[in-house]
Image (cartoon, rainbow, N blue to C red):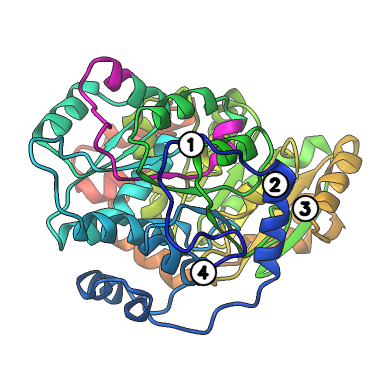
Amino acid sequence: MSCPNNASAPSKQRRSHRRPAGSALDAALADAQARPAPEPQSFTELGVPESMVAVLAERGISTPTEIQARTLPDALTGHDVLGRAQTGSGKTLAFGLALLTGLREAERPRNAPSLRGLVIVPTRELAQQVAAELEPLALVDGLRVATVFGGAPIGRQIENLRRGVDVVVATPGRLLDLMDRRIARIDAVSIMVIDEADHMADLGFLPAVRRIIDATPADRQCLMFSATLDGGVDRLAQRYLTRPAVHAVASASAPVTSMRHRVFLLDHGDKVDIAAEIASRPERTLFFVRTKHGADRLARQLVRRGVEAAAIHGNLNQNQRNRALEGFASGRVRALVATDVAARGLHIDALDLVVHFDPPSDHKHYLHRSGRTARAGATGTVISLVEAHQASDVARIHAAAAVQPDQLTVRAGHPAVRAIATSGDHLTATTRAESRPRRQSPPAHETPTRPTRRQNQRAHRAPAAPRRARAKSAR
């Protein structure tokens, strides 16, 4: 597959020739999106090795998504790639299969560091999830994957790198720290990936990203994925991608069509009660708030109303974040309250409801938050809890996101709220509850609230009761 601006073969001279302007890249993306979808092909037909195809089949993945079908032929033949696709479209496998196949087929240089593949991502959650996606595919061909990110013990990461790895999935700050210590050497990297480039721009990481790319060989292959080209991403692409194959399957403002978008207009005094009513549903619910303190506060308020809840935000250490995510993924934690730090990095299978407790700052954040549901072809619901003074701003965000939500004025106990509160797979929720200890934990970073202490004290005063019964009463 080729694009109008593709080279017949990847040119890898030092980036000295003139780059097209940002408007030219925008035009190339528009042209790429307008091209018809490629004819259906299997992963084998696209050039993915049989060993990896078998691993995908074991996970129930047999048909490439559109972004995978578009980008893999160019990426597997060594072209630089600039890709744009909506969240949940399969971008990780799109670049992961190309990265691992390229390393598998390339001869490892003698007397050179083993690190030959590099993936740069904006958040530690995304680093962990990308690594988890790549590791089973890498293992079948004897390739080793490691993660490097802040908020985790650096000693363990140093030990992993010294032991030797083929691919590192890293956040920019921690990788630069390890480069400055001369622990992480990236001068032998042959393929690198820049994922969620626009989010790295939003977080101010582009200077660090440029420094990292400058430390890689001039002839390495670069695969860049971004939802937009604003915030300096266009200049990054112009500087570091050599005649890239450009592919796009959706614009940054295109909503996921399998989502149902709804607005619940409410009074401030009802907001937490309505959130708790929704969170009490049989299935899991992901809430988004604007601030770290707001995440802590809402998680506590939900726990006090009898909902198993946890918060995740940038002030937590990695173990606390992991516990919150693992609890939510398993179903032990019914409600997860997240700041926007989690919008790009969270991937939870079969998550069918996202709630904007606080409105996002713009339509891009709305789409990325909302994209945690309706992933991989599934359906989902997105609800915005909107107070009167927020209504006009939220309406502008929906318009910019090309979303036309249903809108209702509700109070606690309203039939529409009750319908959401009883939605979800009861059998799945029951099965999870029976397969885990009957015990409620407060948010991973919080001390227990007063009601929980009193309940635990009452349970402690009944030593004759079986352990399972004590744990149940503590709920």
Q: Nearer the viewer, mark 1 or mark 3?
A: 1
Q: Nearer the viewer, mark 4 or mark 2?
A: 4
- The residue singled out by tag 4 in the image is 70
Q: Is the C-beta separation of discs 3 and 2 under 8 Å?
A: yes
Q: x, y (%) of residue 327?
A: 37, 46
Report whether 147 appears left or right of 12: left
Q: CA distance from mark 1 to mark 4?
A: 25 Å
Residue range corresponding to the magenta coloring: 177-201
Q: Nearer the viewer, mark 2 or mark 1?
A: 1
Return the disc, 4 or 3, that comes first in the chain's sequence: 4
Is 173 one of the magenta-colored residues?
no
Return the disc, 2 or 1, that comes first in the chain's sequence: 1
Residue at disc 3, secondary structure: loop
Is 180 one of the magenta-colored residues?
yes
- The residue singled out by tag 3 in the image is 401
Q: Is the C-beta separation of discs 2 and 1 under 8 Å?
A: no
- Which amino acid lies under the numbered mark 2 shown in the image of this protein? Tyr
Return the disc, 3 or 2, that comes first in the chain's sequence: 2
Return the disc, 1 or 3, that comes first in the chain's sequence: 1
Q: Nearer the viewer, residue 301 or 15?
A: 15
Q: CA distance from mark 2 to mark 1?
A: 36 Å
Q: x, y (%) of residue 114?
A: 15, 40
Residue 15's disc is 1
Return the disc, 1 or 4, that comes first in the chain's sequence: 1
- The residue singled out by tag 2 in the image is 366
Q: x, y (%) of residue 208?
A: 47, 24
Q: Dot 2: few (<14), some (14–19), or many (≥20) neighbours within 10 Å?
A: many
